[in-house]
Amino acid sequence: MRLDLTAIEVDTLDDPDDPSLIEATDLLASSVPEACLGLVAYHASGYGSFLATALTPPADARTLILRAVRGPDGLRAVADWRLLPGHLLLNGIAVREDERGRGLGARLLSDGHDLAVRLGCRALLLDVSLDNPAAHRLYRRHGFTELTRSSWREVVGVRASTPAPIRLVNWPAFAAHHTAYGFGDLTVRTALGPEIDLRVVGTAIRVPAVPDAAALAAAIGPLVGIDRCFSAATSTDGHPADAGPELARFVRMRCELASIDTPDVGVMSTQTPLIGKDDETLRRSDR
């Protein structure tokens, strides 16, 4: 039997006080590969509060858009979209376990396509685990093609490493964000000058695949209590010598929007609000 996806109503989580934000956080956290539990922002202690804060600006000023399918007993599925320059990124998507196989994921993808067209985006982007073939098939059916591959690996020897000499570029902003929401992005400058961005979730830290990854983590550890470190690298970059076991592999995929579908509004329309106040289709909107 063919599913009628248009009959599945999608709306936007738009209220900072909506209790469904906690459900959305739990659903999105469940979509992460098991080996990466505790390593992404969805697992941070204050992520629900982060979502609520992200919904406080006017709708046409937001870059985070939460689209969901509701049911009588709570959320059935949710998609976390992020508006980038010229692109709409699917930061996370999850369907409740007892609702799988009913076309909800496909409906949210179709809804994201419509949203991207409305916003004047050139393409959709997403990352998917290589260990999730069902999701790969779904994305390919919706016009996504592979761009790059990357992997996450444990970084070993952090405690035994001599801390790297660094300067903390954005410590006040990072510390406030990490305290409030349980995660944050810390920018540091090494002795040689280049700036490096680190993602801290709770007591886990993600570092780039640089030769001194363990030394970087050792320098940050005493400041935020790091007890786990991993590196993220594309297949072309490779991992440093101190990289340990692989945790997960991901594919970045892209779906080009047909030029006839995309309005001539550049990256983002300056005339039309991101989400219209009276728009019934978009009644409404980090891993």
Image (cartoon, rainbow, N blue to C red):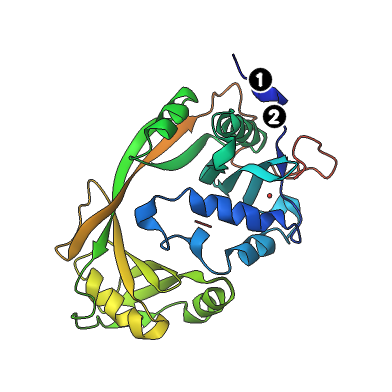
Residue situated furthest top in the rendering: 1
Relative height, residue 101 to residue 236 (above, below): above
Residue 248 rendering spot, x and y as whole percentages: 31, 50
**In-image side of 14 versus 126 (left or right):** right
Residue 76 visible in the snapshot? yes
Query: Tag 1: residue type?
Result: Asp
Relative height, residue 141 to residue 9 (above, below): above
Q: Residues within 10 Å of mark 1 (few under 14, many from 20)?
A: few
Q: Front-most of 117 and 183? A: 183
Quarter of the image holding residue 284? top right
Residue occupied by mark 1: 4
Relative height, residue 141 to residue 118 (above, below): above
Residue at the image point whose x is 55% and y is 78% from the top: 179
Q: Front-most of 137 and 97? A: 97
Residue 106 rendering spot, x and y as whole percentages: 56, 29
Residue situated furthest right in the rendering: 278
Pointers 1 and 2 in contact (CB under 8 A)? yes
Residue 114 rendering spot, x and y as whole percentages: 64, 31
Query: Tag 2: residue type?
Result: Ile
Residue at the image point whose x is 24% and y is 69% from the top: 213
Q: How many marks?
A: 2
Q: Residues within 10 Å of mark 2 (few under 14, many from 20)?
A: some
